[in-house]
Image (tube, rainbow, N blue to C red):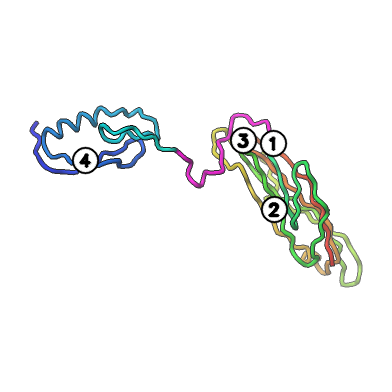
């Protein structure tokens, strides 16, 4: 077969990283005879992250990092015997798995905001849930007082147990925030006062649960 002599730019593709690493000019038939066998001899078993470059260039190892959306994540291991670490925050105080918080007073007519954080750095997280339980004292239009319970879970409870398959990438930290106001809950009456508690329910990727200490709260006028 006769090769026609011509000038052309031949991109040398890094087949392992998917990028062009160098361009060389092929000008003669002899250049092609020297270039094509070299290209055929390249070791395609080179691991990802190594770029051989052009002949006589030193191999360069390129650091491999997870994409931004996967940072703060982990591949779920086959076993994880340690439960997650829960944290709950309300009105500037926090409670954890083994440390409680003082009782807090919150404005009667303002909403409360509860934030839950679940962390599991060696096994990954499956769910973080805000749990709120309160007792409302309502006054009817006739002047009678009545106590009404309120329970809220965010997200709602599930029948299916949380468990993520080993080998799946998942986050090592999950956050959940719920805002609740009580002054709209006394249907046909007005809110006199309320008290309650909030806590964190967390589950890691292996299905292990952990619950934080409760933060007790009450309304102030």
| Label whose residue precedes the other's in the sequence (1 or 3) | 1
Q: Which residue is mark 1?
A: 83
Within the magenta stretch, is there residue 90? no
| Label whose residue precedes the other's in the sequence (2 or 3) | 2
Q: Is residue 219 above or below residue 17?
A: below
* 148 or 44: nearer the viewer: 44
* 188 or 128: nearer the viewer: 128
Q: Which residue is mark 4?
A: 24
Our reading of the magenta stretch's main secondary structure is loop
**Classed neighbour count for the residue bearing mark 3: other residues with Cα under 10 Å, few (<14), some (14–19), many (≥20):** some
Q: Find residue 142 and report its image quarter.
A: bottom right
Q: Cβ–Cβ below 8 Å for labels 4 and 1? A: no
Indicate which label's residue lies in the foreground, 3 or 4: 4
* 153 or 123: nearer the viewer: 123
| Label whose residue precedes the other's in the sequence (2 or 1) | 1
Indicate which label's residue lies in the foreground, 2 or 4: 4
Q: Cβ–Cβ below 8 Å for labels 2 and 4? A: no
Query: Separation of disc 3 and disc 4 at Cα?
Result: 47 Å
Query: Separation of disc 2 and disc 3 at Cα?
Result: 23 Å
Q: Position of residue 80 (x, y in %)?
A: 64, 31
Q: Find residue 98 and report its image quarter.
A: top right
Query: Separation of disc 1 and disc 3 at Cα?
Result: 10 Å
Q: Position of residue 200 (x, y in %)?
A: 73, 47
Q: Please report the bounds of the magenta region as a residue range.
A: 64-83
Q: Is residue 44 above or below residue 86?
A: above
| Label whose residue precedes the other's in the sequence (4 or 1) | 4
| Label whose residue precedes the other's in the sequence (2 or 4) | 4
Query: Separation of disc 4 and disc 1 at Cα?
Result: 57 Å
């Amino acid at each position: 077969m006769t090769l026609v002599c011509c000038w052309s730019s031949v991109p040398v593709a890094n087949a392992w990283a998917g990028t062009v690493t160098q361009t060389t000019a092929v000008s003669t038939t002899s250049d092609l005879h020297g270039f094509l066998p070299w290209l055929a001899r390249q070791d395609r078993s080179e691991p990802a992250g190594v770029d051989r470059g052009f002949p006589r260039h030193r191999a360069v190892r390129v650091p491999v990092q997870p994409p931004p959306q996967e940072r703060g994540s982990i591949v779920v291991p086959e076993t994880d015997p340690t439960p997650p670490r829960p944290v709950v925050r309300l009105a500037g105080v926090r409670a954890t798995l083994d440390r409680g918080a003082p009782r807090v007073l919150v404005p009667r007519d303002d909403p409360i905001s509860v934030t839950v954080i679940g962390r599991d750095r060696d096994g990954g997280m499956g769910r973080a849930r805000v749990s709120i339980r309160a007792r409302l004292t309502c006054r009817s239009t006739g002047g009678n007082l009545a106590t009404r319970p309120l329970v809220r879970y965010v997200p709602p409870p599930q029948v299916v147990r949380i468990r993520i398959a080993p080998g799946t990438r998942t986050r090592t930290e999950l956050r959940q925030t719920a805002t609740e106001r009580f002054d709209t809950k006394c249907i046909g009456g007005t809110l006199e006062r309320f008290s309650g508690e909030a806590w964190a329910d967390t589950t890691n990727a292996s299905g292990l649960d952990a619950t934080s200490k409760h933060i007790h709260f009450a309304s102030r006028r």
